[in-house]
Image (tube, coloured by chain):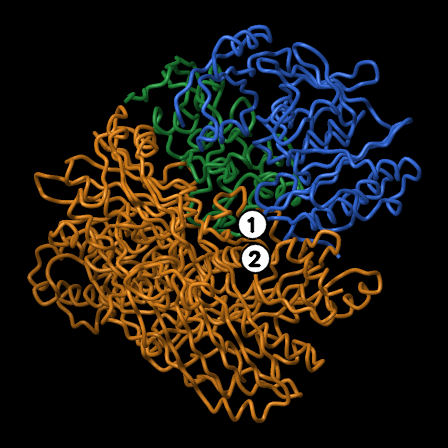
Amino acid sequence: MTTKAVEGERHTIQVTVNGKRQAAEVDSHTLLVEFLRESFRLTGTHVGCDTSQCGACVVEFEGNSVKSCTMLAVQADGGRITTIEGVGSREALHPMQEAFTECHALQCGYCTPGMVMSACDLVRKNPSPSEAEIRDWLDGNLCRCTGYNNIVRAVSEAAQALASGAQAGVKSGA
Amino acid sequence: MRSEMKALKVLGQPLRRKEDLRLLTGAGRFVDDVKLESMLYLATVRSPYAHARILAIDKSEALAVAGVVDVIVPGDCPELDRPLPEVLEPGTLSNPYCDLHLTNPHHVLARGKATFQGEPVAMVVAESKLAAALGAEAVHVEYEELPAVHSAEDAMRPGAPRVHDANPNIIGHLKTAIGDLDAAFRKADFVIEERLAIQRLASMPIEGRGIVASWDARREEMTVWSTDQVPYRLRDALARMLDIHYDRVRIISGDVGGAFGGKGLIAEDLAAAALSRRLHRPVKWIESRSENFVSAHARDQYHDVRVAARNDGTLLGIDLKIVKDVGAYNHYEMVQTTNTVNHVLSHYKVPAFRAEGWCVVTNKVQMRPTRGAGRPEASFVMDRVLDFVAARTGIDPLEVRLRNIIPAEEMPYSNGLTYRDNVAISYDGGDYPRMLRLAAERLGYADWRKRQADARKDGRLIGIGISSSLEAGGVGPCEGARITIDDKGRVSVYLGVNSHGQSHETTFAQVCAEYLEVPYESVRVVAGDTALMRYGYGTGASRVGVNAGNAVMLAALALKQKIRALAAHVLGVGEDDVRLEAQRAFVASDPDRGRTFAQLAQAARANKRMIDLGGPGLTATEFFYPETVTWSSAVHMVAVEVDPGTGIVGVLKYAIVHDCGVPMNSAVVDGQLQGGTVQGIGAALGEEMVYDVSGQLLTGSFMDYPMPRAADVPPFEIEHLVTPTPKNPLGVRAAGEGGPVSPPAAFAGAVEDAIGKRCRITRMPLTPQRVFEIIRDAK
Amino acid sequence: MKPFQYRLAKSVPEAVAALAQIAEARPLAGGMTLIPALKHGLAAPAALVDLGGIASLRGVSFENGELVVGAMTTHAAVAGSPIVNERLPALGRLAGGIGDPQVRHRGTLGGSVANNDPAADYPAGCLGLGATIVTNLRTVSADEFFTGFFSTALAPAEVITSIRFPVPMRAAYVKFANQASRYATVGVFISQSANAVRVAVTGAGRSGVFRAGEMEQALAKDFRPETLPAHCVALDDLNTDLHASAEYRSHLINVLARRAVEACMGAPSRHPVRHGGAYAF
């Protein structure tokens, strides 16, 4: 009888997470989401499915929103990652977070970090999205509580707030 | 019972949620975020067959996987040899209709044979999640596949294979009747008969289930982090399994990522706790989405309905036979079928009604409630019936409804049925005709009728659907609240109910702020920890707003009374001379003489006056016991366009009129309604758990199970009415289930109306393919 | 997920060498299909050779009347490429309709084409445009490249480097997306060039993407939706699953082909595109 090795091959990677550059050891089979949650205890990034549909795990990688459950940690080597923890703080919410609470765009909050990360990516790329563009963009993020309409409204209001510079002093991108 | 209506300052306001700051910044704490020193991970080996004898389990290869600590099969762990507890223990039921209820023992691990695909067969504990998963893969189980029953109809056939050897497949029966049904059918101008079916689907919160169980061997105490909707039931089940006092088990809920009825006790909960005590290490189990798909389903009920009606569109009688497929195990007695019976008459007067129902086991995943719990089935039956009557008589569907509706002046209205708490049903107010007319107005009903006729000339298919619903909610027995003021005047509200998105920290802070007359900002709601309150009955069945809301109100009033008594003592005046305002108690005739709540809280620590006031501290605990349920109501109307090419159903307009009494936070109520409605749209247009004939689930992931997404939902036109209920002091009704109940019926009506040609829509969901087939067959 | 080795290739020869050397090694492109397959144990390679570090495999250019797209160009990059949207907007729209934004940020042309999922969009684009698939070894026409259900003409250790798309006079892709997965239940790509009309159908065929010859002939004679035959493929050759029967798929092929022809003619459909979504009267 053979004993299968559970330990995979280890790699040392360099990543910049929420602005902080750090080196880490990862297994080749470690997913980016596991790496963020386990190695850095950045538990705001969630896992809601295993087929890349729900989007609870969305983070920003090299300027794009990606599903961190469908990327290996080694693939992030050398890259910049922003998670929900790097978007805003309790004291200074990002305008997107501000709009989510103002518009009652969350209930249980499980999908929310991924939803915010995805929405921030949209308004970075399209500063004044139409309602239809917002709905289409959020295709990779499932929410079971809100019914989406308040989320769509929040993204639209955040885009307006960001565009009009109403939130001066807050950085304009996640 | 309701106290005099006062002008509300805080209650009902759409205040920002207190939960949001942490959830928006990634600081929520969900079960999977809990990581303890030396924690082990649990993985489950599941039956790949719907029905199979288990001949042998070989765990040797799994035990050899690096990191695997133990492999558990039946008999390995005596604590796990007892069946899972029933949700409703036989003998404690008050269901007035149910005359048969058989229980099949549901073991943590299948004994002898597996009865559905996904049933736990063995479990593996390991040092890492990966090792546990690899270990589970290395457990070799030898099965002998048995013939499976994959539908209730098959299961009821004589000679059908038995799902459980000890009992027949029909495990539950109920019946009830009002009026003279035979006379109704004798007097009828016409009779309609149809089979109407609501599909099997699932709750699908974005977070799956999970548990971390940690046994403290020195203190002999179990601490558990869990996603369970009813933490006290989990506490009691673990205490019973471990044979310890239930105060030695503490369940912490933290943040829970949605539940909708599906997050109850399951096998892994018991296993994690038993293994933690056995191994003296914390044990964690997190359900994958794939596992979530085979852990609990909902609905799956069909209805054979016979209707006696007159040519003027009035209903004379309904004869209803209901069959519910409960899957392999049923822990909910006949609650959902009973709900269907008690909601099916909806907003309408039906002089004669007879209902009979059966619960049937099959080789499919066990049934749990999901949002609506028998009510979407009820509205589907009633609104389909009314639409069929409209089609038969040529009277407009809106008019048919107005001819049968309960007039506002007949409130409170009793239809002769009995609720499952054994109290006679009485609709406690509301104006159903007004709601229906208002919904028609908000939709632009007359206008859409005109546009429908015009569009038909161009070959375009436009239709309107109408559905009314009722939601009996706020079922007891009770909930409690404890309110405490600290030395700085800060207020804590402790509850025995946990939240999975319902905004408890916000809404109950509003109730407390309103009735204790303190700032909303100073109130913190603490819940989801069985160490804080010793009793709680769970967040489900839209019961928490009524039960906990009124408990908070009663506790706030009791605490004010206590403050008044203490202040009178401290100030040396009579209680009637004390006034409370702005967190301060003072002498009415001399407002400068007074004490702040903070000062009184300090005084209450040692002042002997507190002997008669329940002991030290400014604290009060009250429980609210409702007499019976309260009834919320809704009307949904939708105008759709059907693409005859693809079968796609697009929404032109969607209007909702909703009445759930006094809102605690209007934005929260609106959010419940919208989110629930979208779940209903998912059920109407796509969601379905599909099995093949061998009992294999074909829809095992989000690749095949269509969850509604942002672009799949329309904006809603919503009108909230407020008819306070006299049945509780706050005047609140249930708000959780006004959304999901009506969409299936409304879309069925709308699509049928759009296609025309006397087609009849009789089963859900209306996937594009199904709509294509209906159009094809209508030609 | 079972452990495996990981190699980041810096060049095509390095990738090819690694794939040849390590038994049961697989190339990793965007990973949007492969990583979920690893998670579910549907694939368990001994090693992954990551093509993500090879800069020469990314980018879009227009050369000799053809649009040349590097194999590792993401769907988002194709959808957002000014060159694509000027020369071949139908391809840009196809890429912009794959999966969701996060999938489009990682998923690649080469990965999609090499996988040849029978419900993927790009194979229809390649076949419908008569593209040429360029590998490290050779060039293969799309007609010869897609050989059946999840299978292609690629040899072991052969990797796609780019795909060359001839630019037709007009082209359109119309897709009926699966409600759940957003893959094509049926997708029809139609192009008209000076000498030919091509109609490629994805999502429907039992052995993957195929050309609808009867439709091509009808449209070559008269490029109008009305000329399309109601049924162009034997039902036995069409897929039946829980989402769509062969009969429904056959019907959809005709409906979508008509809409694609209308789109080529500049008359986009006014029908609702999303089940349950808002629709203007």
Classify mark 1: residues with Cα within 10 Å, few (<14), some (14-19) or many (20+). many
The x and y percentages for residue A34 are 39, 28
Q: Is residue C60 left or right of residue B249?
A: right
Q: Are marks 1 and 2 in contact (CB under 8 Å)?
A: yes
Residue at horizontal 60%, vertical 66%? B746
Picture disc at residue C190:
none
Q: Quadrant of residue A123?
A: top right
Secondary structure beneath disc 1? loop
Residue B406 visible (yes or no): yes
Q: Nearer the viewer, residue B745 or B531?
A: B745
Residue depicted at x 46% and y 74%: B343
Side (left or right) of B723 relative to B275: right
Colour displayed for chain A in the image of the structure: green
The label shown at residue B681 is 2
Q: Residue furthest right?
A: C221
Which chain is rendered blue in the image?
Answer: C
Chain B display color: orange
Q: Amino acid at mark 1?
A: Pro
- Pointers 1 and 2 within a single chain: yes
Q: Chain of mark 1?
A: B
| Residue pointed to by mark 1 | B708
Earlier in the chain: of badge 1 and badge 2, it is 2
